[in-house]
Image (cartoon, rainbow, N blue to C red):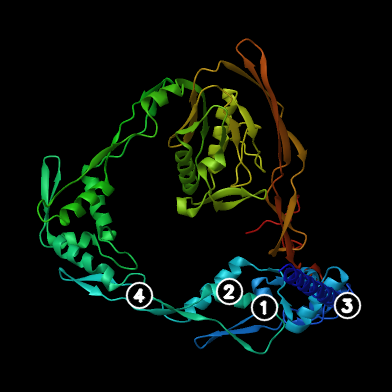
Amino acid sequence: MRIRNRRRVNARRLILARLLVLSAVGIVGALLVGIAFAGSSDRLAAGVRIAGMNVGGLTTGEAIARLEARSRAVASVPVVFAAEGHEWRIRPANLGVEADWRAAVRRAQSRSSGFGPIRGLRRIGIRVFGTDVAPPTRVWRQALRYELLRMGRSIGTPHRDAAIVLHRLRPALVPGRTGRALDRATAQAAIIQALIGFERGRTVSLPVREDPPVVSAADLAPVVAQVRLALSDGIRMSLGRSSWWLPPGQLAALLSLPHGGTRSLAIGGPIATRYFKRLAHGVGRPPRNAGFRVSESGRVTVVPSRPGRVIDATATRRNILGAALSPGDRSARVVVTSQDARRSTAEARAMGITTRISRYETIYGGDPNRIHNVQLVARLIDRKLVAPGATFSFNQATGARTADKGFLEAPVIINGELTTGLGGGVCQVSTTVFNAAYEAGLKITARTNHALYISHYPQGRDATVNYPDVDLRFVNDTPHWLLLRTFVGSSSLVVDLYGAPIHRRVVTETRPLVETGAPPVKRVPDPALFEGVKIVDDFGEPSRSTSVRRLVYWANGKLLYDNTWYSSYRGEDRIVRVGTKPKPPPPKKGPSGPSGPSGPSGPTGASGVTPQS
């Protein structure tokens, strides 16, 4: 027994030794084969393809150069995509498709890299089975989505979901229909792959799939029974002590039947919207925010807020549908709720607006369109509230001055010239607002003078605006809210600012208006005047400048602001008509002297201007 066991042990040892020898031989052989096929680590393995192009055996630099050159060569050649008999020709630039060839080469190199024998074994696998590396790609997703949407609209037919329609008051089922649609996810990948590839000349087929309906006729069978029940009788509507009858025909118009993928019955649609608007008009009342009433003396009182009364359309729709689907109690109550004002009486009082802190008035007139624009923009800024620390912006308060808002063409200064434009007269309002803020002693952060001097505005205290770049802005630097009010009369505009008493004293120092240049001369050729004759149609205005210094003091005499506004005004053209008509030839001399006793054909004034008839 012992001898037999010893023989078994020896046999096992012999088998193990042979296995170890064979394993060593195999490992050595594999290492030798790996070394033999390892090649240079600087070159890509044979069998490597990038975007379908064979780059095996090339250095990384050679591979990148070849890929980029081939990409440039086919960049202007479109790829033809086709589906359902339609074709589209798309270039890579159309969708912003760009491949990162350097990254692709690095990725291909990493698949065949490593320690010599290991690299060789990997390269044997690549040589036998091959490998194709897709490069990282950038694409304009929005353009790609648009292109897929355009393709999808051109091919196939969309599915149709089952729906319910009414024949008089009888419901009927409209079965669904399976459509065909572009498989967008697969098509997207195919488009990108084709555009980064180098193959041109063949047509790339895009996948089209069946598009089944989302809602089938079986899904809506229970809803048909609900519609029959809903229209089997009318509904008694009630609001407080009032009630009225909603007959089946009118109820049918309020029903929103399942369609376009919906599965349930509802109260809705444009007719239902109009029905609830009529209800709201009859019983509803909008909330009123707390406001402010001002007196001629400058005192401010708070106008209390008032809650509104509105129809709760959602709850009322729910009640109507519940009554329609009830076999017994077919009555529905109109739900009315209260709606609080956005600004309560207490909030208005807490704003601290109690008295007028400044007033300014300017006179206007002239063109009816200009008067209209003054009145319109004054209404736009009337009752504006400015929070403590907030900035009032004239342009923000009025918005763009457009014809849609009712602005008309009127005289306006554009590029330093008086002409007509949309919204002429707006600067009358901005100038009045500026002076109201000026007199209140508020911090003014943006003000621009007109290009031309306007004598009926306070000297150096005009303020022009032009949406959206030239603005008038001032800051509410008081601890309470400010209220801006405008009062438009037949020939004057008044702007009042209301708030809490601020006890500021304003002192103004105005520098004289000085001329800084002569009027520019504009010569206008006139073929009706003889050469050398000049007539002045408009003497123009010289350029001028002035400045206004404002000192704002607290009640205790401490200086708060010391501001100076400089204003420079362009000169207005001196318009001179210059004759271009050739002078007549002088009269011929006869035997007894000049022809005629008067000499020249007509007198000439001392100023050199020939009188015109």
Q: Nearer the viewer, residue 470 or 103?
A: 103
The residue depicted at 73 percent of the width and 69 percent of the height is 5
Residue at label 4? Answer: 160
Dot 1 lies on which element? helix
Q: In the image, what residue type sits under mark 2?
A: Gln
The residue singled out by tag 3 in the image is 32
- Out of 222 and 285, give the one closest to the viewer: 222
Question: Which numbered disc flags the more N-terminal residue, 2 or 4?
Answer: 4
Q: Position of residue 609 (x, y in %)?
A: 72, 54
One can see residue 48 in this view:
no
Kind of residue at badge 4 = Arg
User: Mark 3 or mark 2: which comes first in sequence?
Assistant: 3
Spatial distance from mark 2 to mark 4, Cα to Cα? Answer: 25 Å
Q: Are marks 2 and 1 in contact (CB under 8 Å)?
A: no
Residue that label 1 marks: 195
The type of residue carrying mark 1 is Leu
